[in-house]
Image (spheres, rainbow, N blue to C red):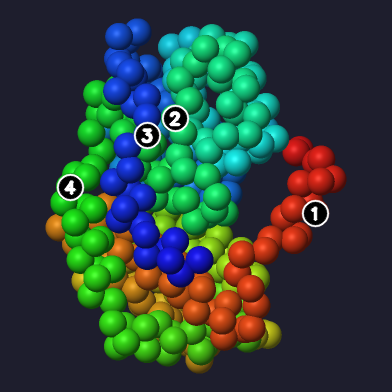
Amino acid sequence: MWRWALGLPGQLAYEAPGLEHLRTGNGIPHRIIVAGMGGSGVSGKFLDALSNGGNLPIIPWPWAGAPQWLSKDDALLAISYSGETTETLTTLRDGLERGARVIGISSGGKFTDLFTNEKLPLLKVPEGMPPRAAFGFLLGTSLRVVERLAGVKLWEPVETIETLRILCSELSGEEYASINEQVRPLKDRPLVIYGTCPLTAAAAIRLKQQLNENAKVYAWANTLPELAHNEIEGAGPGVPPQRICLTLADKPPPLDEVLRDGVQTIYLKGTGPNPLAAVLGLVLHGDLLSLALARERGVEPEPIERIEDFKKRGWTG
């Protein structure tokens, strides 16, 4: 898992076969719905944040079945690393019935047969890893799909990838020691991760997922300033959660001063030549943090027995 986490720059650089055939020839879609769950679906959160302020709505859709308003004027980007995700397959079939323009990203599974039979574009990413470990493959491919499908460039790939390559190459014993130091207060208490803008909110969800799956701990995510209108009033008796705040801003929010619960918020500030590079630096840090916490707790990060058990029971809502 450590090797996959540090492979983020190379994954982002991957260009899936078939991308060159995607064109805006059928017209630019009115909206793009990004269907996916868990580690496959979180790319939609980043696309939504990056498209903020533009003219093309990009809507993450972590549900079984397409929204009622999906139409032939929309595009449906279905992401399932395994190609077997029940909820995403249900949404995909709804999209086909509604006449939406459908594109898939997967490593195989049922997606291969469905897209082949329907003669639809399926962009294949390398197989053989947990979906959450393929984050860079899925996000990078998604960003390229949006650019080819709608003519909207949401990132600077060369600059972003080079920044992350340098970051990975510069990770030293000192940086790992810093991560190990941050792990200690996370070990025996619930965790909450806060994002302070749309991009860090997406990164907060990613970190929550990584802490859940890799370290096998309860964690949840929220956003500022939204939580300042409700959640902070709920602080009370019992063990307070350890807070992790992801930010791109120089001035941190005054959480500790307001809550006064004895917990020192861990602030992680992203830096880089562009917002996505800065946030993906936070994603990399968070991935390594979740793996360090798994090691501290003496658990294997890769197995996901409860998730597999839940899937076998067939409930999709």
In the rendered image, which residue does mark 1 sit on? 309
Q: Is residue 133 left or right of residue 49?
A: right
Q: Quadrant of the C terminus?
A: top right
Relative vertical location of residue 212 with respect to residue 140 in this rendering, above or below: below
**Rounded to the nearest whole Å, what is the CA distance between mark 1 and mark 3?**
32 Å
In the rendered image, which residue does mark 2 sit on? 123
What is the x, y in percent for residue 305? 75, 61
In the rendered image, which residue does mark 3 sit on? 16
What is the x, y in percent for residue 91? 62, 26
**Rounded to the nearest whole Å, what is the CA distance between mark 4 and mark 1?**
41 Å
Question: Badge 3: how crowded within 10 Å, few (<14), some, or many (20+)?
Answer: some
Q: Quadrant of residue 190?
A: bottom right
**Rounded to the nearest whole Å, what is the CA distance between mark 2 and mark 3?**
6 Å
Q: Which sits earlier in the primary sequence, circle 3 or circle 4?
A: 3
**Rounded to the nearest whole Å, what is the CA distance between mark 3 and mark 4?**
16 Å
Q: What residue is shown at x 60% (from left), y 41% (from top)? A: 82
Three-letter amino acid code at the position of disc 4: Val
Relative vertical location of residue 27 with respect to residue 86 in this rendering, above or below: above
- Please report contact status of discs 2 and 3: CB closer than 8 Å, yes or no: yes
Secondary structure category for the residue under label 4: helix
**Rounded to the nearest whole Å, what is the CA distance between mark 1 and mark 2?**
29 Å
Three-letter amino acid code at the position of disc 2: Leu
For discs 3 and 4, the disc positioned in front in the rendered view: 3
Secondary structure category for the residue under label 3: loop
In the rendered image, which residue does mark 4 sit on? 158
Relative vertical location of residue 48 with respect to residue 207 in this rendering, above or below: above
What is the x, y in percent for residue 203? 41, 58
Q: Which sits earlier in the primary sequence, circle 1 or circle 2?
A: 2
For discs 1 and 2, the disc positioned in front in the rendered view: 2
Three-letter amino acid code at the position of disc 1: Asp
Which one is nearer the viewer's eye here, 39 or 54?
Answer: 39
